[in-house]
Amino acid sequence: MRVVIAEDLALLRDGLTRLLTAFDCEVVDAVDNGPALLPALTRHRPDIAVVDVRLPPTFTDEGLRAAIAARAALPGLPVLVLSQHVEQLYARELLSDRAGGIGYLLKDRISHVRQFVDAVRRVAAGGTVIDQEVVTQLLARRGHDEPLAALTAREREVLGLMAEGCSNAAIAGRLFVTEKAVSKHINSILSKLDLPPADDVNRRVLAVLTYLNL
């Protein structure tokens, strides 16, 4: 798997490079600023771009804008965004293009190496990976008069894991319940949110995130 990394902090950039290389990924380029990212992506056409949202020179949204521009030039280019904070606008911009894999992870929650590498692989394969904390904060920002208020605490947990791209079996394992119970929760969630049931995990995630107005 060929990877382009965009991260301005040298230690983190080097750490990501070493980590992904150790798991049989080829880091074909690692840039430290926004203007350098788009040329790197269009030149290398990687299997995935791992991008920090805020890059020099302004430290606002250079990374995201370069990634979106690259996806316009290379439709379906998988992008995994790393951010220090939950930025609803950034998530909406990223998810507005439904082609190709997409991911949004918070930097300070990347503590398990294999989970991070698995997220990279899932996005590269066309899947969707959204940090559960991102979903939790987005849910909290919705008004209590929204249909989300009808969800039980357990259903909110399941919704968060769905947004991470977890399968029914993975959700069951994380919550220590049966797959049958997970299926019932998901059907209830989709019904309460007025979203049609779907077996495909990625489609379910995109449907939920679309509902959340990302």
Image (cartoon, grey):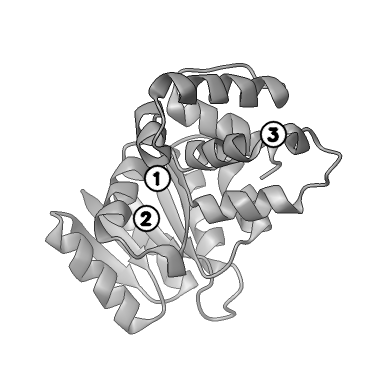
Residue contact between numbered discs 1 and 2, judged by CB atoms under 8 Å: yes
Task: Measure the C-alpha gap from mark 1 to mark 2.
Answer: 6 Å
- Dividing the picture into quadrants, the one containing residue 185 is top right
Q: How many marks?
A: 3
Residue at 57 percent across and 43 percent down: it is 95
Taking depth in this image into account, of 135 and 206 the one nearest to the observer is: 135
Q: Earlier in the sequence, mark 1 or mark 2?
A: 2
Residue at 64 percent across and 48 percent down: it is 92
Q: Secondary structure at mark 1?
A: loop
Q: Earlier in the sequence, mark 3 or mark 1?
A: 1
Q: Amino acid at mark 2?
A: Ala
Task: Measure the C-alpha gap from mark 3 to mark 2.
Answer: 35 Å
Q: Which residue is mark 3?
A: 151
Q: Around disc 3, counting alpha carbons within 10 Å, would you say few (fewer than 14), some (14 to 19), or many (20 or more)?
A: some
Q: Secondary structure at mark 2?
A: strand
Q: Amino acid at mark 3?
A: Leu
